[in-house]
Image (tube, rainbow, N blue to C red):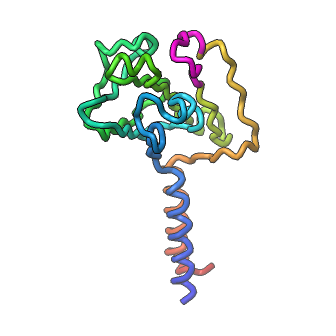
Amino acid sequence: MGSKRCMSVLVVVFMALVSYSQAHKFFVGGKDGWIVNPSENFNHWAGRHRFQVNDTLCFKYKKGSNSVLVVTKEDYYSCNNNNPIQYLTDGDSVFRFERSGPFFFISGNADDCQNGQKLIVVVLALRHKSDHGDAPLVPSPSPVASPNSDSNPSDLNNKPTPPLKENSGSLLRFKGSDVGLVCLGIVTSMIFSNFRV
């Protein structure tokens, strides 16, 4: 009876740890979705979140009347929709971050882009133990463009980003493979010791 209870506790702990390592799904604009005049500026919305590799953005909009373009930094600031890197049109578009660094999104409608329907997301770099020893992985704040839609590209580089305080309440993220290996080791040792705790 005790071994079943112990195994149940281990399974619950394992599932809780694994849930911290999963990629996250973000709905751009929250309840408003991808619209021209959201209740919160898209870059302000992005600044409140920490994006990592494998996270996804979900863009909700009316199919056929709007679209989302992934563009270069230059095309973002000029609202140039003629040469997108990627074109999303289905009204329920999902974009997955496969690398770290900045990503630039604009509306397919140049007028909507000029009116602020655009977004910059900075995806945090992957850190490995070999980079910084055993230091915890604490995300740094994402730079946010000025809410003014006619801001210039140097605005992002001229505004210093304050560092997070050590106890700022940010969640630490662990690599799924690290958590999985630790949990596998615990479960394996429990099995080989016949659940003697």
> Which image quadrant: the N terminus?
bottom right
- Depicted 129 relative to depicted 76: above or below: below
Q: Nearer the viewer, residue 144 or 23?
A: 144
Q: Horizontal placement of 89 versus 177: left or right?
A: left
Depth check: give the residue in front, 55 or 15: 55
Residue numbers of the magenta segment: 144-155
Residue at 55% over, 80% down? 195
Residue 191 is inside the magenta segment:
no
Q: Nearer the viewer, residue 153 or 3?
A: 153
Q: Which residue lies at the image location 48% right of the left edge and 42% below the top edge?
A: 30
Q: Is residue 173 above or below residue 52?
A: below
Residue 148 on the magenta span: yes
Percent from the top left, x then y, of residue 120?
Answer: 49, 25
Q: Looking at the figure, which quarter contains the C terminus?
A: bottom right
Secondary structure, magenta segment, majority class = loop
Q: Residue at x 56, y 74 (%)?
A: 9
User: What is the tally of numbered marks visible in this picture?
Assistant: 0
**Percent coordinates x, y for residue 106 in the rendering:** 39, 23
Image location of residue 36, percent across then percent down = 42, 28
Whole-percent x and y of residue 188?
A: 50, 68
Which residue sits at x=54%, y=62%?
16
Compared across the picture, whether 129 is left or right of 38 comes to: right
**111 vs 131: above or below:** above
